[in-house]
Amino acid sequence: MSNADAGDSDEVILDAPGFIRVYKSGRVERFLPVDFAPPSTDATTGVSSKDVVILADASVSARIYLPAPPCPGKLPVLVFFHGGGFCLGSAFDAAVHAHANRLAAAAGVIVVSVEYRLAPEHPVPALYGDAWAALQWVAAHAAGRGPEPWLTAYADLGRVHVGGESAGANIAHHAAMRAGSEELGHDVKLSSLVLIHPYFLGGESSETDEMGVALLRELVRLWPVVCPGTSGCDGDPLINPMAEGAPNLASLGCRRVLVCVGGKDPMRGRGRLYCEKLKGSGWRGEVEDWEADGQGHGFHLSCPMSAEAEAQVRVIAEFLSYG
C-alpha cells in the first residue's frame, strides 16, 4: 500500500466529539468507556444477577436478573436491549445494570439484558439478528428445558416481553415485528413491547431546543456509518418504521405496547407518531404512552433517583403486571 493509500484509509468518516470517531480503515475510537459493574445481589432491591452466554461464536451474551424471593409462582420474562446509538454502551455498564435491577424488582420480572454486537464493526442489521437469537434462546427454556436453571425453574414463558431504551427500543421494535411473521419456537409468543425513548429518525422532527437539534443532526450523520446500506433516514424502515413503504405495523407480533418519551427528547415526536401510526394501522392490540414532563433523552440513566425516573419505572412495572 502506498503512503497516499495508507493516509486515505485512515481518513475520519465520522467524528462525534466525546462519543465516537470512525475511520475509513474500519478503526473505531470510543470515548465513553463502559463503567463495568459485576453481577451481584443488589443490596437495595435484593435482585440477584449473573452472566450467561447466548451465542459463543458471535460473542452474544446476557445478564439475567432474578427478583428476590419470595416469588409467588413463576415470573414473566423481559428481554431487554440497552441503548447507545447502535455503536456504544453495554448491558454490563453500571447505569444499565442499576436500571435493570430496579425494573426486575418493581415489575417482579426476570430481566434478560442482552449484550449484542456493536456497529460499525458489526453493521446494522447484524444486531437485529443477535436480538432474535436472544429471544429464541429464552423460548428454548419452555416446558422446563434449556441450559439456564433460573429460566427453567422460575420463568413463565407464557408471559414474555421485549423492550429497550433508545437504540435498544429500535431493536426491540424490530424483534417484535419479526415475531409477527416468524415463530420463536416452542409455542412461545411475545406478550408485549416496551419502548423507552425510542430511537427513530426521519420525517419532520418535533419542536426542540438548540441542543436537541444538534443531537438530531449528529444522529442523522451517524446512521449511514452504522448502517452502510441505508437509503437514508427518511425512507429506511430500519430507522424510520413510519416511512412510506415500511412494513405495516399491523403485523407487530405482540398484544400490547407501551411507549415512554421525555418531554424534551428531540425524538419525542417520533415516539408519539409511532403510537399514532400503530393505532391507525389495523393492529388489534392495546397501545399506551407516557411522557416525563421536561425530561430529556435517557434521563432515567443520568438521573436514576429523580422523581421522573422512579415514576417511569412504576409505569413500566404496572404495564408489565397486566401482560
Image (cartoon, rainbow, N blue to C red):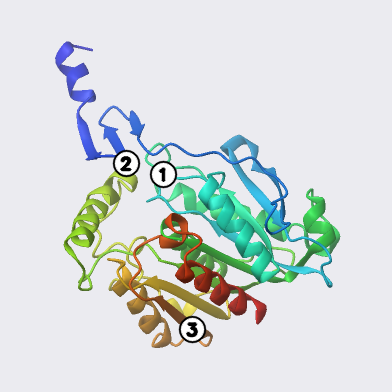
CA distance for labels 1 and 2 = 8 Å
Q: Nearer the viewer, mark 1 or mark 2?
A: 2
N-terminal label among 1 and 2? 2
Question: Where residue 228 appears, x then y in whole percent?
Answer: 30, 45
State if disc 2 and disc 1 touch (CB < 8 Å): yes
- Tag 1 residue: 88
- Mark 2, other Cα within 10 Å: few <14 / some 14–19 / many ≥20: some
CA distance for labels 3 and 2 = 34 Å
- Residue furthest top as drawn: 2
State if disc 2 and disc 3 touch (CB < 8 Å): no
Question: Where residue 108 appears, x then y in whole percent?
Answer: 71, 69
Image quarter (top left, top right, bottom left or bottom right) of the N terminus: top left
Q: Which mark is residue 274?
A: none
| Amino acid on which disc 3 is placed | Val
Q: Nearer the viewer, mark 3 or mark 2?
A: 2
- Tag 2 residue: 19
**Disc 3, SS:** strand
Q: Which mark is residue 287?
A: 3
When the figure is inspected, residue 93 is found, relative to residue 274, above or below; the finding is above
